[in-house]
Image (spheres, rainbow, N blue to C red):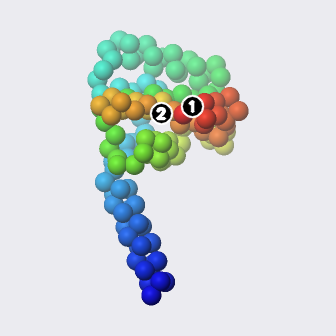
Amino acid sequence: MTRLRSMIVFLAIFAGMIGLLAAETMPSKPDRYFNDYAGVIDQATVSELNEQLAQFERETSTQLLVAIYRSMQSESSVADYTQRIAQTWGVGQQGRNNGAVLFVFVADRHMFIQTGYGLEGALPDATAW
């Protein structure tokens, strides 16, 4: 009986986790460095910041992206959600994993930096969090 109860609890937790993941929207990888999907920054500034981030990658080989959204499209924590997005996008150079993404969710008042393993020495998760 205890084994059956444990199995039922496990399945309930698993089903809940699937429900959370099914309810989220995974945004597609942007084609620019600076992306303001919430419309909070004027277009001239967006263009200027995009060029500065492009120049930074040319000079350092480190790719930095900024993604500003109106709100999170997930019930997960901001850390888990942004990690899944960053892994899907594959920011940074292939094999070097030297990218980082600053996520901003305006309505939720959340910001989070996801770093690739290639940047762990310069920007560890503990610092980015």
Of the image marks 2 and 1, the number of the one nearer the N terminus = 2
Q: Are marks 2 and 1 in contact (CB under 8 Å)?
A: yes
Q: Amino acid at mark 2?
A: Phe
| Classed neighbour count for the residue bearing mark 2: other residues with Cα under 10 Å, few (<14), some (14–19), many (≥20) | some
| 118 on left or right of 103 | right
Q: Quadrant of residue 21?
A: bottom left
Q: Amino acid at mark 1?
A: Ala
- 76 to 39, vertically: above or below: below
Q: Quadrant of residue 110?
A: top left
Residue 122 pos. (x, y %): 68, 28
Which quarter of the rendered picture does the C terminus lie within? top right
Residue 27 pos. (x, y %): 37, 42
| 115 on left or right of 3 | right
- 71 to 52, vertically: above or below: below
Q: Which residue is mark 1?
A: 128
- 73 to 111, vertically: above or below: below
Q: Which residue is mark 2?
A: 112
Q: Quadrant of residue 61?
A: top right
Mark 2 lies on a secondary structure that is: strand
| Of 58 and 40, the residue lying toward us | 40
Q: CA distance from mark 2 to mark 1?
A: 7 Å
